[in-house]
Amino acid sequence: MSDSPAGSPAGSPAGSPVDLVITGCAVLVHDDRGRIRFEQDAAIVVRDGLVESVTSAADVVGLAAVERIDACGQVALPGLINCHTHAPMVALRGLAEDLPTEEWFNDVVWPVESNLTEKDVELGARLACAEMIRAGVTCFADHYFSMETVAAVVAECGMRAHLGEAYFSSQGPQGREKSLEFALRHRGTADGRITTALAPHAPYTVTDADLTATAELALEHGLPVHLHAAENRDQTDTSLARHGVTPVEVLDRTGLLATDLLLAHGTGIVDRDLPVLERASGRIAVATAPRGYLKFAWPDTTPIRALRTLGIPVGLATDGAASNNSLDVWESMALTSLVQKSAEGDPRWLTSRQALHHATLQSAQAVGLGDSIGSLAPGRRADIVLVDLTGPHTQPVHDLAATLVHSARSADVRTTIVDGRVLMRDRELLTLDVPAVVRELGDRLPALVDRSHGRRIQEYDT
């Protein structure tokens, strides 16, 4: 691939040059029924941060452009979206391994998180954004602490993000108030690339009163809500034993199902929850992160087929790197297809094309951005990744969708673009200095991982 500025060649249309032309690639597009297809030998024209057109390569030969990218042998996809993560937790990658969920939280993660400083969060966010950009992720939904710091990193590095300041009821009303204050102050910032949500942690760490108050604030201020719920079957069984209701029924009785709600994981959603979700008046979506479920040996996965029947979009996610070890949504896409086949006992579900749909348009819908990202079409934000399929592991190509999902890897992403701005060109990061971040984070790790104080930010007891 070669990138070169272009002037106004002879015969080019009158008027100012477009900002960017990507040419010679296959382009994944969605039809008016949401199905995907591929346009061959195509071109994408970008102006003012938007896709102006998806056309043939022949049609842009004489088009004046500030920058041109020759993407021969590559596929252009909408930028991938990580629909639920805790980006700064990359600093804890590999720290808590081979543990059940309760020990993972209580013995390692929540004690270490009690040490977090804003600088730790900043460095973790920088490293996470670099990892995601290199993996073709252009937008992420983050649910964590010190979101002011994460927002500053997002603004600087050029990514798109849906951010929520997490809180527990153990913090008192100040936690909820801080989450609201952040959401109101930062929505629409970073030239519109940042959207925000209220972010209660989960029904088992946030009281019904606080969940009800959150729902009221969300409706009053027009804010979505992002939280963990029915993460696994144990949580559902414990909720039923203690309270006589499932976590999803808690969301219903506290009013959260009347909000625009992004529910993380949902592997504990049971049959009695389905009619509750079906009659919800809010826009409900679910984020699935299958690698973590396998690692924790949870017996179930997100019931995507049942949710699809209800019309609930399911976006792809990684969760935090402390549990998943990776922020690779490409891997989540392949695992979602494979795990769903196993769970349903049906090799025809979930197909490669369905997996690509979840990774693109459904993920955009899950984070409330289905009208602006998730597909490559005129008027959409120019969030684009170029994937190189010339390697031996992706050849020959009999089925392009299957090649992308099951043969290609995140390392095959050559270029990552957000709002028409190139953040990575030919595998070179342009907005983040990874070696500097790694050095500084390494210096801080001894203090960060110390657990001798015996504190923890919360108790895991579902």
Image: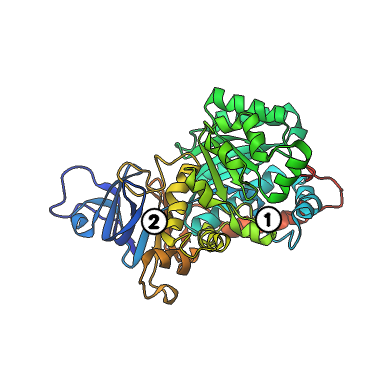
Name the foreground residue: 286 vs 44: 286
| Relative to 99, 324 lies left or right | left
Q: In this view, does 207 lie above or below 66?
A: above
User: Residue 322 has which mark?
Assistant: 1
Residue 342, quarter of the rendered image: bottom right
Classify 10 Å Cα crowding around label 2: few (below 14), some (14-19), many (20 and above).
many
Residue sitting at x 72%, y 44%: 117
Residue 412, quarter of the rendered image: bottom left
| Relative to 196, 35 lies left or right | left
Furthest-left residue in this view: 11
Name the foreground residue: 309 vs 316: 309
Furthest-top residue in this view: 220
Residue sitting at x 39%, y 39%: 371
The residue identified by callout 2 is 77
Q: In which quarter of the image is the N terminus?
A: bottom left
Q: Quadrant of the C terminus?
A: top right
What x and y, as percent, mark residue 112? 77, 50
What x and y, as percent, mark residue 332? 54, 58
Q: What scheme was used to colour the molecule?
A: rainbow
Of the residues under marks 2 and 1, which one precedes in the sequence? 2
Q: Give SS at disc 1.
A: helix
